[in-house]
Image (tube, helix red, strand yellow):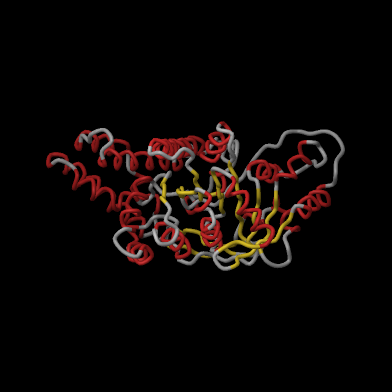
Amino acid sequence: MRPLSSVAPFLAAALVLLSPPGAGPVLAQDSALVEAFRANRLPLRFEGPTLAGAGGELLLREARAAQFTLVGEEHGVREVPQLVERLLNRLRDAGYRHVAIEVSPLAALRLRALARTGTPRAVLDSLFRDRSNWVPFYTMPPEAGLLAWALDPSAGGYDVWGLDYDIMGDRYWLPRLESLAPPEGRPAVAAARALADSGFARALRGDPSRVFTFSAPESVFTALRAAVAPQAGSEAERIIDVLATTTSINRDFLSGRNYESNEQRATNLKTNFLRVYDAAVAGGEAVPKVLFKFGAYHMERGLNGVRQYDVGWLAAAIAEAAGRRSFHVLLAGGPASDRAQFDPTSFSYKPQPAEMMRAEWMAAPRRSVAAEGFTLFDLRPIRALIQNRRLRDVPPQLERSIFGFDVLVVLTGSGPSTD
């Protein structure tokens, strides 16, 4: 795991694997692996509201045919939400109705409700001017634009699902909880609010570890449950559960229990996904079709880079068990591009070099990108070369990506999302 300055949902993608040993004829990595990527390289470009080029056609064709399209992104790249919007623009008539994103279920409910009060983009822009209302990563204008488009019934018209936890949730949900609490329970909520306000003030002075959802002790949530006594399934219960789960995940991270933190988060994502997926089926959708947009390792098929079977694995299993397909897309910033990285000491996003395509393990696709425009690599044919031992010494992280994703899209010429 990375330092707090990039902890999820401010995490950059991390893809790690121990590859299995192989035997048989070896093709030199510096030539055969590059050749394999070049042989499976297709151009992709933006053309108005859609995707064009052979790579764009493949992306649209495979996504439309799948039940789930899982976009695993390098966070903070300006062109990622632009590509996703163009993809969604062509998926509606293929039966897609839902977009799952890296926010909490409560945050998604709130955003959907707010979007109904006016023009979604204007509503979100107004909301996010106050840092206490932030919903990472959607304070960045390109991300806010995608979210507003998806929520707008006259544009995307998608149902937005939140599957994650809520880093900034205390800013809005504790005041809401206080209004829902019985009179005798309000002092306990007020005490939690005071702790959260003090922590937020210290975070703004440069100590992000004091944010409530990183620092609140478990006793706070025990006291809230006892004082509020929420009914099962009520909004008050959901608020306490989201804040307690978020804090538990982050408390493990800060204490060095990285595996346990990631395990909790993956379980939370899967639990939340099954809840809304089952509700969609119960509501009459025989085959709910969903596009996911998350950090890369959440979207991997199989054991992911932090040794978890995450929601990407679950979606793939659900589709396969029903005789359908999932389509997994890895999006990376350009080899010489910047991306936006959240700086919790200043509560702002700042440019920094995009990391994935600069990594040593990405040398082969980096050497294979087209000179101009975006490049899509179809990873599926390369799997057989590895499994049949025609390629050896493939970097472990790259091998994991080849088997965990179906295509890699390199956004050459991309830039950072602005704050």
Viewer-closest of 387 and 83:
83
Q: Is residue 135 left or right of residue 332?
A: left
Residue farthest to the right? 25
Residue 153 screen position, x and y as percent: 39, 58
Viewer-closest of 258 and 62:
62
* Number of disc labels: 0
Residue 283 screen position, x and y as percent: 38, 39
User: Up-down: is 289 above or below 260?
Assistant: below
Residue 137 screen position, x and y as percent: 45, 56
User: Up-down: is 211 above or below 414?
Assistant: above
Residue 90 screen position, x and y as percent: 54, 56
Residue at the spot x=30%, y=53% of the render?
Answer: 171
Q: Is residue 161 left or right of residue 190?
A: right
Q: Quadrant of the C terminus?
A: bottom left
Residue at the spot x=68%, y=37% of the render?
Answer: 18
Q: Quadrant of residue 67?
A: top right
Q: Quadrant of the N terminus?
A: top right
Q: Quadrant of residue 365?
A: bottom right
Residue farthest to the left? 183
Viewer-closest of 207 and 146:
146
Q: Is residue 118 left or right of residue 398?
A: left
